[in-house]
Image (cartoon, rainbow, N blue to C red):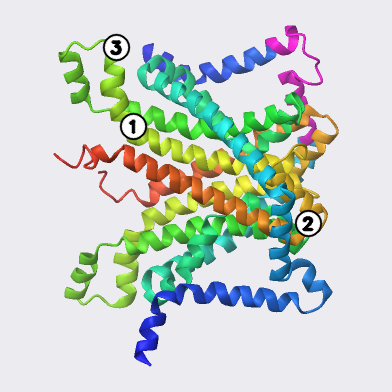
Amino acid sequence: MPVVLTRLSVFASPLALVLAWLLLARFGGFPAQLLVPPQEVYQAFVELLQSGELREHLANSLSRLALGFCAGALGGLLFGIAMALSETVEAYCGPLFHVLRQIPSIALIPMFILFFGVEETFKVVVVAKASFFPVALAASDGVKGIPRRYFEVAEVYRLPLPSLVRDVALPAAAPPIVTGLRIALSRAWMVLVAAELLAADSGLGQMIEMSRQMMRIDIVMVGVVLTGLVGFTLDHGFRLLERRLLRWRDTP
Amino acid sequence: MTALKRLLRPWRGLLLPVLLLGAWELASRQGASQAYAFVPLARIGDGLLELLASGELWLSVAASLQRTCLGLLAGVCGGFAFGALMASSPLAERLLGPLYHALRQVPILGLIPLLALWFGSGEFTKVLIVSLAAFYPMALNAFEGFRNVETRYREVGRLYGLTPLQRFTQVNLPGALPSLSTGLLQALAFAWVSSVGCELFLSTGLGLGNLMMNAETGSRMEVVVIGVLCVGLLGYAMNLLFSRVSQRLLRWRAPRPGDSR
């Protein structure tokens, strides 16, 4: 019984929040338009789901995220590895990289809008930028962090290069890189939602912004909850992947 | 020749930025359509002088910084208290932890429309958003810091018969300091980004974000570029300042407790 209680206590505070919301909406004396009761939010969610509107916005957002993230992460991976392996690349590109890294992606949104317009390109570029830097940094650190003695042992065994890369370098550098990818993905999602809030014709962020202008708080809340859920799912999925990929490692 | 090479070696990192700037300048001279996006470097300089002379830049920077500091203060205090509470009481952790982790998933900037509808688009909403952005990392790090204070230190504290307040100030707080300073650093970064972010969205009031957004609607690329540079520079400067200060304050615990065993 106590074990069950402990398990259930996980839900205590979220449930309490929903209950407080319910009670406040009913008896708090706030206008229902401002503090929308939970059941109306749920209704809005069902309506959006049935009309297919929600699926379209979600699909648009996620496809932008996938495109931008793949481009940014791949570029970051290659650049980071190049920077770790070659001193020349590091000497020439390192300073610029570390300066540009300091600029928050959000601050670049107005600049990118002027460059690329408010079309699709702009959002993909923002996402790619947001994913490039964390991945590049993680890849560079990860490759640099491979202990030198691994290579020495590999040399003693006269390991051929493909096998060296596959069996020694990749497993050793993978953990920080996977973590970097996860951080990049959650940042990219946040920046994408921000970009869609500012300028878009579709997507989850645009849905929120549109409904805000029409004072449809119920849809705004559906959007906010969904944004959180997507962020959580992406992050959690990556964590599971991380654990699965790295399960061969001894736990420290 | 080799002497020249050696002389130039430390400056290799400057080659790429200079080339990029040159390409930018070149692109700006390719006719009016290009100059729209790639403003000539001279125009950026002029714009900077103009903004400085009119005081617009100072006002914007001051407004953004003030907002960040206010929000940071509120968020850090709240996060510290919340983290300490969760670390000190398992019941509080079990009850509040899940809610905290669930709410943490919602991107702060996604909350702006909702909070703007509830609280208006004035100063209060902005400070609230900034303080929320600072709250989450601070709470997490405070929790971990207090949680991971070494048991043997606590036992010593108990042995000496310290009162709860003494135990807090002399055992737990010093033990958690490194983690707290990490939390503060993260909170600062998040607060700064979200401060600029919420200024981009909520167009009333002053701030670097407002400056950039107004410039964007007026297609004044030079002002946008100056804004971006300011945001990057100020963020970097604050980060440097904080990490230097915390390094100095924490220099007494150079060896980490786990290493010296």
For the stretch drawn in magenta, what is the main secondary structure? Answer: helix
Instruction: Where is residue B156? Give x, y as percent.
Output: 16, 20
Residue drawn at x 69%, y 70% as measured from the top left: B41
The answer to whether residue A59 shows anywhere in this view is no
Residue drawn at x 76%, y 36% as measured from the top left: A49
Residue ID for mark 1: B177
Residue drawn at x 18%, y 69% as measured from the top left: A153
Instruction: Where is residue B170? Give x, y as percent.
Output: 26, 21
Relative placement, left or right, of B91 versus B22 is left
Label 1 sits on a secondary structure element that is helix
The quarter of the rendered structure image containing the C terminus of chain A is top left
The magenta segment: A23-48
Q: Please, which chain is the residue tagged with disc 1 on?
A: B
Q: Please, which chain is the residue tagged with disc 2 on?
A: A
Do marks 2 and 3 share a subunit?
Answer: no
The relative height of residue B261 versus residue A65 in the rendered view (above or below) is above
From the viewer's side, name the closer residue of A139 and B60: B60
The quarter of the rendered structure image containing the N terminus of chain A is top left
Instruction: Where is residue A194? Give x, y as percent.
Output: 68, 45
Give me the C-alpha separation between circle 2 and circle 1. 45 Å
User: Which residue type carries mark 3?
Assistant: Pro
Residue drawn at x 43%, y 50% as measured from the top left: A179
Give me the C-alpha separation between circle 2 and circle 3. 58 Å
For label 3, count other residues whose C-alpha is less than 10 Å away and answer few (under 14), some (14-19) or many (20+): few
Q: Does the magenta segment cover residue B158?
A: no
Residue ID for mark 2: A118
Give me the C-alpha separation between circle 1 and circle 3. 18 Å
User: Which residue type carries mark 1?
Assistant: Leu
Q: Are the residues at dot 2 and dot 3 in contact (C-beta closer than 8 Å)?
A: no
Residue ID for mark 3: B164
Instruction: Where is residue A7? Give x, y as percent.
Output: 43, 20
Q: Identify the image quadrant of residue A91.
A: bottom left
